Amino acid sequence: MATPTPQSVRSRLWGLTNLSHSTLHDVRPLNEPPSAALIDPELKKAKTELRRLLVDEEMAIATLQTQLADLPADPQRRLRAEIAANRETFNTPGYYPPPASPLNKIIAYRYVLSAITAYAELIPISRREVEDMQKELAAAKATLNEQEALKAVLEKRVAELKNPEAILVGADDSVVGMKMRSKRLRTKTGRTIKALHTFFERHLVTALAMEELGGPIVGLGREAVDGKKLLRKAKGQMTIEEAFRAGRKKERERERERRARNDEEEEEEDEEEDEVVGELESLLEDLMEKSLEADPYVALKRESAVARFLVRAKVAEFHPRDAKRLKLLNFAGTFED
């Protein structure tokens, strides 16, 4: 029998230590242990073989102990010997049981069990990774669809730009459509303005003129009133007060003055109505023009009944800090809201 080297003995002892530990401690799973009737015979055989191997190794160790006296005394030679022994130990393969050994089944069982446990731990992690990849894939598909749609639009536009005739036809169609829309808008605007003027002349002018002279506020009264009559009454009351302050006059002079005043009142009524119509139309035009500018407010010369009526009708609104400035309400913004 050849004398074993220290390196081979150390390598075999290391392999036996690992093999005996795995055989005696980790041969059965925790949840479903194998049947004792199937494992006990194999364990007995493995135990016998391990004991035989341990005896062989102990004999090899005893042989090595007798050779300790032959170690070199020089520290450098001893260091070289240890380095060579370590290299041989690392290069020597570990111990493997022979093919007919019962340890092979136990080792295979332990390896399969450890692999199953590792895979069971990796399955949830893999599922989470798959879910994350699916989300990323869905986001990538959505981005791809958007890019394809944008590409189709750009290709269509490039094709149109490459064809001058198509550009001219498209431009002509756009111009014709804009002209038709502008014509319809002008027609509707004209009808609206005409209806607005009719409403002013028939219903609103007299009431606003009456409010301007101290009559009831337009839009707040519930009963129908005769504007002409109330306007004459207001004018008559003002004339009586003036006559009272002026003193007594002769009856004949008062009669002549009253007749003259009646004629003047009718003229003043017509003039007042004309002024109200002109003020209303002018104010509406100014409001519409100013609404297109950066500063939409119109400066009022005075706070008239016309301006107050437009505010009450929700057509315009005063400046929050200046009652002499008025602007048109943003009807488009109201519709969008």
Image (tube, grey):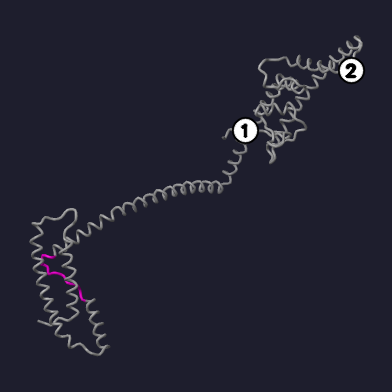
Position of the C terminus by quadrant: top right
Q: Position of residue 291 (x, y in %)?
A: 68, 36
Relative to residue 25, is residue 91 depicted above or below?
A: below
Neighbourhood count class around disc 2 (C-alpha, 10 Å): few under 14, some 14–19, many 20 upward = few
The amino acid on which the numbered mark 1 sits, given as a three-letter code, is: Phe
Identify which residue, 307 or 98, lies in the foreground: 307
Q: For the residues marked 2 and 1, what is the alpha-carbon distance in whole angstroms?
A: 53 Å
Q: Which residue: 17% across, 68% down?
A: 19
- Label drawn at residue 90: none
Residue segment shown in magenta: 92-103
Q: Which residue is mark 2?
A: 246
Q: Position of residue 133 (x, y in %)?
A: 37, 52
Left or right side of 251 for 201: left
The amino acid on which the numbered mark 2 sits, given as a three-letter code, is: Ala
Identify which residue, 198 or 39, lies in the foreground: 39
Left or right side of 243 for 295: left
Principal secondary structure, stretch drawn in magenta: loop
SS assignment at label 1:
helix
- Label drawn at residue 331: 1
* 46 part of magenta stretch: no
Q: Position of residue 128 (x, y in %)?
A: 33, 52
* 96 part of magenta stretch: yes
Left or right side of 16 for 212: right
Q: Nearer the viewer, mark 2 or mark 1?
A: 2
Residue at the limit of the structure toward the top, as seen here: 251
Which quadrant of the view contains residue 17? bottom left
Q: Position of residue 214 (x, y in %)?
A: 76, 21
